[in-house]
Image (cartoon, grey):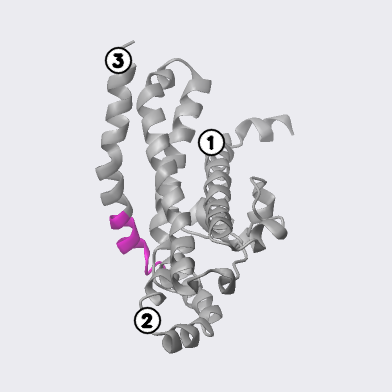
């Protein structure tokens, strides 16, 4: 029995853990950003339902979590928003929707800066390696989450931004069919139809933001 445990490939478990923690961070801050901006715009629904919380369990969606951890693209349990409480419902919904992806981009920028600042610790032992690797993976996953969520397919954030440019009649008509968008997303994600396009988009954005990591590294070299 002891030999079985010794022969297990623990790198698989380690890799899963290195993805799980960043995913929880990314989905939690993404959903909190939605709730906070909605609150600032006059909708208290998320706060009243206990969803304006940094507790990741509040925002956990098992299928979305699995997809994020293993496919790189996924979703969280949506924060409830009542757009009728906004002074300008369509504009308020668009701003609230954008808050999530914007939060993820900010997380990516912060993590890349920390990676550049701390990457030398990865050379000083296993703990340092896992710390720096986790920071870089958080940056990558967060950016993937941002790019995935701006796709204009309901219920993703991009659809709410796109719909804000439509007429009132068209907007509310399309919102009634929002639930069917999730079926389409399942098909696209599971079939791999989005992998190439989203992968290129994330890689392009990551390359552009890498200058932040270089800035952190230059700052580290000053000390």
Q: Main secondary structure of the magenta part?
A: helix
The residue carrying pointer 2 sits among few (fewer than 14), some (14 to 19) or many (20 or more) residues within 10 Å by Cα, namely few
Q: Is residue 80 above or below residue 212?
A: below
**One can see residue 73 in this view:** yes
Q: Tell me the residue at 35%/76% (across/down).
A: 165
**Tag count:** 3
Q: Residue 69's x, y, as percent?
A: 52, 51
Closer to the camera in the image, 66 or 155: 155
Counting residues from the N terminus, which is met first, the one under dot 3 or under dot 1?
A: 1
- Quick one: SS at disc 2? loop
- Residue named by callout 1: 11
- Residue named by callout 2: 166
Q: Image quadrant for the N terminus?
A: top right
Q: Which mark is residue 221?
A: 3
Task: Between label 3 and label 2, give the one nearer the viewer.
Answer: 2
Counting residues from the N terminus, which is met first, the one under dot 3 or under dot 2?
A: 2
Seen as rendered, the residue at the extreme right is: 1
Closer to the camera in the image, 25 or 124: 25
- Quick one: SS at disc 1? helix
Q: Residue 190's x, y, as percent?
A: 47, 68
Residue 11 located left or right of residue 51? left
Give the residues drawn in magenta, as a range: 192-201
| Residues at marks 3 and 1 touching, judged by CB atoms closer than 8 Å | no
Q: Image quadrant for the C terminus?
A: top left
């Amino acid at each position: 029995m002891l030999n079985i445990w010794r022969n297990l490939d623990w790198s698989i478990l380690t890799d899963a853990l290195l993805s799980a923690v960043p995913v929880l961070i990314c989905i939690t801050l993404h959903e909190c950003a939605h709730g906070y901006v909605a609150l600032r715009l006059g909708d208290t629904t998320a706060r009243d339902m206990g969803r304006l919380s940094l507790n990741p369990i509040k925002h956990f969606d098992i299928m979305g979590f699995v997809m994020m951890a293993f496919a790189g693209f996924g979703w969280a349990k949506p924060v409830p928003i009542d757009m009728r409480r906004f002074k300008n419902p369509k504009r308020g919904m668009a701003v609230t929707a954008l808050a999530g992806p914007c939060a993820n981009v900010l997380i990516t920028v912060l993590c890349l800066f920390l990676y550049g600042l701390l990457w030398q610790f990865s050379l000083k032992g296993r703990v340092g390696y896992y710390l720096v690797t986790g920071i870089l993976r958080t940056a990558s996953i967060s950016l993937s989450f941002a790019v995935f969520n701006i796709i204009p397919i309901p219920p993703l954030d991009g659809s709410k931004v796109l719909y804000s440019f439509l007429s009132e009649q068209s907007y509310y008509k399309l919102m009634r069919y929002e639930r069917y968008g999730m079926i389409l997303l399942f098909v696209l994600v599971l079939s791999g139809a989005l992998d190439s396009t989203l992968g290129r988009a994330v890689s392009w954005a990551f390359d552009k933001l890498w200058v932040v990591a270089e800035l952190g590294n230059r700052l580290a070299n000053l000390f």
